[in-house]
Amino acid sequence: MEIKEYIESGVLERYVLGNVSQQEQAEVQCMARVYPEIKEEIASLENVLIGYAEVHATPPPTGLKQKIWGEINAIPSEEKIVPESDSGTRIITLYKAAAAIGLILLIASVGYIFQLHQSFGSLNSEMAEMEENLNQLESTNESLVEVLHSREFALDIINNPDFFPIRLSGLEEKSPESFANVFWNQESQEILLSVGQLPSPPADKQYQLWAIEDGTPVDAGVFNPEEEFTFRKLASVRNPAAFAVTLEPFGGLPQPTLEELYLIGNL
């Protein structure tokens, strides 16, 4: 296991809380001696725990001090000072008093430790949630950067005078409100397809772009209407007369289904 994975495994948090087996405790201590970053992480977690405890510290219950002194004062005077010959009885009496005081302190400390454990568990859960949100933000940011680069690339092509724009309009009988734009570079034979509006296809179908040259349709690939821009190159097309879009089975066909013609535009 890599050091980063070991640190993120959660064993160090459980070690700081004292919630590990003896074997795990020995393992963590050994790893901390070998790897300074693990030792630093343990120190960091301990500081977080101490800081959290200080912020959320709960004072001892009101009257605890008076209760302890009350237990002590409740011991009869004659039992506090006894003749030397009764030293055994005195020891037993003092032992009982000490046991009572210890029990009270134990109950108070156990309650406080339990509350601290719950608070640290809540903090750990909040930190995990924050880390998850951060990962989602990073993923969203990466997607936005990809979209931005795609749009910048498309804008460069659209503004390039070597690319000739062709408007593809929807057929009246199929989808008159649909449209798209093709930017064609005759020299490089590159195409940029910009989808304006097309109905969402069924799950088992895709739209397919065609270049029409000498009355023969040439496959220019399938695409999804959700794709804002689609860039490709047609090595076998030199002088297309038109471009068209049909709806085909998923993956496309070698020849267009004319009954499913949605868009067409002439140069």
Image: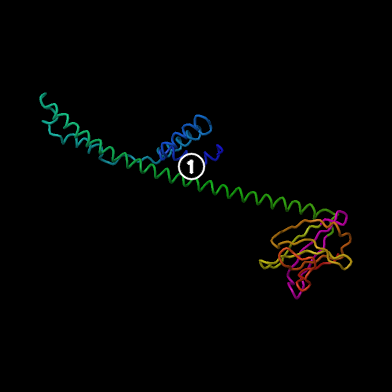
Q: Nearer the viewer, residue 3 or 145?
A: 3
Q: Which element carries disc 1, helix, strand or loop?
A: loop
Q: Is residue 172 magenta?
A: yes
Query: How far from the left and from the top, in percent, is residue 107?
Result: 28, 41
Is residue 48 shown above or below 247? above
Left or right of residue 215: residue 62: left
Query: How far from the left and from the top, in percent, is residue 82?
Result: 11, 27
Left or right of residue 186: residue 125: left
Q: Is residue 72 magenta?
A: no
Q: Residue at x 62, y 51 (%)?
A: 140
Left or right of residue 76: residue 202: right
Q: How is the image coloured?
A: rainbow
Query: How far from the left and from the top, in percent, is residue 47?
Result: 45, 35
Left or right of residue 62: residue 240: right
Query: How far from the left and from the top, in percent, is residue 213?
Result: 87, 65
In magenta, the rendered stretch is 165-190
Is residue 249 shown above or below 22? below
Q: Nearer the viewer, residue 9 or 61?
A: 9
Q: Residue at x 46, y 32 (%)?
A: 29
> What's the residue type where badge 1 is placed?
Gly
Q: Nearer the viewer, residue 39 or 243?
A: 39
Q: Residue furthest bottom?
A: 173
Looking at the rendered image, the quarter that the N terminus falls into is: top right
- The residue at which mark 1 appears reads as 10
Q: Residue furthest top?
A: 84
Looking at the rendered image, the quarter that the C terminus falls into is: bottom right
Is residue 176 shown above or below 47? below
